[in-house]
Each structure stands twice: as C-alpha cells, then as structure tokens.
Image (tube, helix red, strand yellow):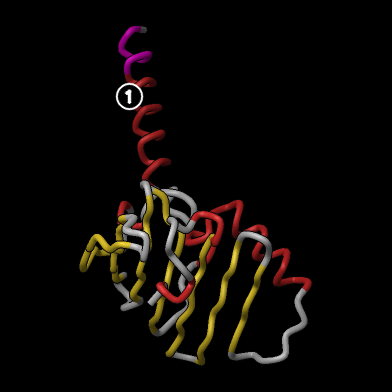
C-alpha cells in the first residue's frame, strides 16, 4: 500500500512537471522548454529606458523560426516566420487563443493572405501565402517600460 501511494505521488509530480513544461505560451513561460523547438540564440537586450529583457530565437523540426520576447520570465511578444503557420493554440495558450478565435470568427475577412486581430490587450497578425508565412503576437500591456511594437523585429 505504501508503494502504491509513493508511485501515485511520483506519477502525480511527474504529471505536474510535464504540465508546466507544456504551458509555453504568450503571457507564460518561454516555448524553448518543450519539443520540438531547438533554441538557436538567446540574448539580453535593453529598452530605450534601460530595462533588460530577453530575446530567444528558436526553430522547430519543420523549419519554422520563432522569436520570443521575455520580460521577468513571461513571454510578452512573439514573432514567427516559415513554411507553415505555427500552432497558435500552443503559442497563444488557452486564454488568448480563445479570445483570438472569438475575434477571428466575428471578423470580416477582406484578404485571404493576411489576418489581424486586435483587442484591448492582445494583437495577433499573420501574413503570407502557401510555403511563406510570417506573423506576430503581443500583449501591449506587458511591455517593459520603453519597449514599443517597433522593437518586435
């Protein structure tokens, strides 16, 4: 009986650990914590007011490149490009993906090559055509002081 309780505890802790590792999302931990992404480069940069933030450049096994902007351990902006649109469910997380999906379903699409959704906190844009996509997402209320949308490059 003690063995079963210990095993249950170990599996529960393992499950919690795996859950934390798969919660890489906008507003959460950087995506480099889960597969299939490989971190190519990580640098510390500074806003115009001298506030430090980290930029992580990653690539997945399909060649999509993702750049994440992290401040105080939380992703506040993402930039991507590659042959396919990334899995926005993973990148945006449950909360922001739901908001994106609701706004997208109510939007009037004028151009099949671009998509842009903006609300009071979240901005998601995606552009491109088959085999060549690029886009970004960001939470403007989580920018460090002195950071602007123009810094997402």
Mark 1 is surrounded, within 10 Å at the Cα level, by few (under 14), some (14 to 19) or many (20 or more) other residues, namely few
Residue under the image location 62 percent in, 78 percent down: 116
Residue 132 drawn in magenta: no
Farthest residue to the top: give it: 1
Residues drawn in magenta: 2-6
Kindly indicate the quadrant of the structure image that contains residue 52: bottom left
Count of numbered tags: 1
Left or right placement of residue 60 versus residue 84 in this view:
left
Left or right placement of residue 36 versus residue 144 in this view:
left
Kindly indicate the quadrant of the structure image that contains residue 35: bottom left
Farthest residue to the front: give it: 49
Q: Secondary structure at mark 1?
A: helix
Residue under the image location 65 percent in, 65 percent down: 100
- Depth check: 138 or 151 in front? 151
Residue beneath disc 1 = 10
- Depth check: 39 or 153 in front? 153
Residue 4 drawn in magenta: yes
Q: Please state the horizontal and vertical placement of residue 40, each as a whole percent of the image.
A: 21, 68
Is 107 located above or below residue 122 in the figure? Answer: below
Quadrant containing the C terminus in the rendered view: bottom left
Is 40 located above or below residue 70 in the figure? Answer: below
Quadrant containing the N terminus in the rendered view: top left
- Depth check: 76 or 47 in front? 47
Residue under the image location 27 percent in, 63 percent down: 45
Q: Please state the horizontal and vertical placement of residue 36, each as a whole percent of the image.
A: 31, 62
Q: Please state the horizontal and vertical placement of residue 47, each as a whole percent of the image.
A: 35, 63
Left or right placement of residue 128 versus residue 48 in this view:
right
Q: Please state the horizontal and vertical placement of residue 15, each as a whole percent of the image.
A: 40, 35
């Amino acid at each position: 009986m003690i063995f079963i309780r210990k095993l249950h505890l170990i599996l529960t802790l393992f499950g919690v650990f795996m859950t934390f590792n798969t919660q890489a999302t906008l507003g959460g931990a950087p995506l480099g914590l889960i597969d299939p992404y490989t971190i190519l480069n990580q640098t510390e940069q500074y806003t115009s007011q001298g506030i430090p933030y980290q930029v992580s450049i990653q690539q997945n096994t399909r060649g999509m490149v993702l750049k994440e902007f992290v401040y105080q351990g939380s992703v506040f902006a993402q930039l991507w490009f590659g042959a396919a649109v990334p899995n926005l469910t993973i990148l945006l997380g449950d909360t922001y993906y739901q908001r994106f999906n609701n706004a997208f379903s109510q939007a009037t699409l004028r151009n099949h090559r671009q998509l842009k959704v903006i609300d009071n906190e979240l901005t998601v844009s995606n552009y491109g055509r088959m085999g060549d996509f690029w886009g970004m997402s960001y939470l403007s209320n989580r920018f460090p002081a002195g950071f602007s949308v123009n810094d997402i490059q």
